[in-house]
Amino acid sequence: MARALLAILRRDLLLALRRRSDVLTVLLFFVIVASLFPLGVGPEAELLRTIAPGVIWVSALLASMLGLGRMFAADHTDGTLEQMLLGATPLALVIAARVFAHWLVTGLPLVLVAPLIALQFDLAQQAYGVLTITLLLGTPALSLIGAIGAALTLGLRGGGALVALLVLPLYIPVLIIGAGAVDSAAGGLDVTPHLLLQGAFLLLAAAFAPWAVAVGLRISME
Amino acid sequence: MLAAVDLQCIRGERTLFTGLAFTVQAGDLLRVAGANGQGKTSLLRMLCGLLSPTEGEVRWKGSTIQRLREEYWRELLYIGHANAVKDDLTALENVMTACALAGLEAGHEQAGTALRQLGLAGCERLPARVLSQGQRRRVALTRLALSEQLPLWILDEPFTALDTAAVSYVREAIERQVARGGAVIYTTHQDAGIAAARSWSIDLDRGGR
């Protein structure tokens, strides 16, 4: 079973490596959206410093949504998904491996680039660590929740817009906790409660989302 | 081994078949016949557990497949219309992934041998993107060579897009499987002329008789 999961992880990373443009699109989208705000609201340092946590988090939210459509669509078209549904490994575990791979190629780059974006907003120095940690805890949760939306809208016309409507409201807790933590850190407050909440949310998503995705996929494949 | 109990399939407003019941024993070769749109693929997908029947159930060794799930799927080889071949992976990588998903223990050696058996020597390291339609079908059918120990094969149109050499390879693979005591359920439009001791068919044009 572990061998099968490793093989799936390896396959997804290999596919991402051979289609680098998909990965770069998400990353560039994040950088560009976050960079539009200073251009729009003006170069006032105090204002930028205030909006930085929210802007970075909202940009990360939108960027991570961009890749959701592709999570199962190609496998659905070429029949690989059927084979996953009929595999010897429980589907929920296969999905967990696939979501992890998806996060590695779309979520992790955002986490790594975010501090550079924060520099652009002159974020308070003590908040950089917290920004990275909350994104590290938050983006996997976004991928997990997003996978549910992707599974439910699989094969539907206009699924891309629908997935945004389904998933964005569910992203709200992650956004509030994540941006709140960075805000508090910038203000010199204690962020432990935020981080604990963020971690709890991630655990909850990791425990339940794969099963929900599995059910969603079985319904979509009928 | 595999029993279909009063299966009914309704797609949209149309009833494709109803009250369909049959049993497949070890060593059986069952051909599902019928014109386009008569529900051949739907029936096969039901037997796999991809599609739940509107009424009735499918049983494997006495238990419904909805309960058995992975226990049943581990013993099943299903090759559908779609090849499950990824354009960006090489032929060998595609076969290895398929085996990993199916829980088959196949190393590079075995997978390479199987590919060569299907006439894909020299294509192992090529991305599937550059392969022809028939070659991609061959990559999908490579799993036949690696699934010899599985007791049940369900093949949806295994002969499409294949040349005569590949058709005869697939035919022989099916014959060997049935002779070994495995069961094979398949659909096809051309008469493949597969020799088997216990070969029978279901005709969906005549309500599954």
Image (cartoon, helix red, strand yellow):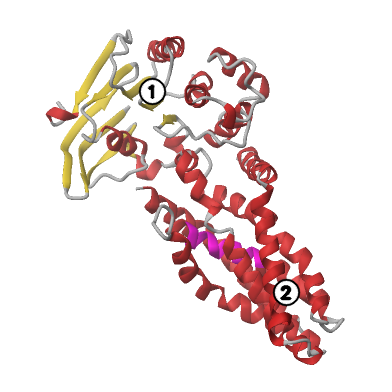
Q: Name the residue at the right extreme.
A: A125
Task: Out of A167 and B154, give the one closest to the viewer.
Answer: A167
> Mark 2 or mark 1: which is in front?
2
Residue B168 bears which disc, if any?
A: none
| Amino acid type indicated by mark 1 | Thr
Looking at the rendered structure, the number of numbered marks drawn on it comes to 2
Cβ atoms at labels 2 and 1 below 8 Å apart: no
Label 1 secondary element? loop
User: Mark 1 highlights which residue?
Assistant: B160
- Name the spot of residue B21 as percent of width and height, x first: 19, 32
Give percent across and percent down for residue A11.
Answer: 64, 40
Q: Residue A35 carries which label?
A: 2
Residue at 15% across / 29% down in the picture? B205
Where residue A215 appears, as percent x and y from the top left, is 43, 55
Residue under mark 1: which chain is it in? B
Stretch of the chain drawn in magenta:
A139-150
In the image, is residue B205 above or below residue A104?
above
Q: How crowded is mark 2: few (under 14 residues within 10 Å), some or many (20 or more)?
A: some
Instruction: Residue A142: say if magenta.
Output: yes
Q: Which amino acid does label 2 sit on?
A: Ser
Q: Is mark 2 on a helix, strand or loop?
A: helix
Q: Where is residue A180 in the image (x, y as percent from the top left)?
A: 69, 84
Question: Where does the N terminus of chain A fall, quadrant-wise?
Answer: top right
Q: Do labels 2 and 1 share a chain?
A: no
- State the image quarter where residue A51 is shown: bottom right
Establish if A95 lies above or below A179.
Answer: above
Would residue B85 be counted in the magenta stretch? no
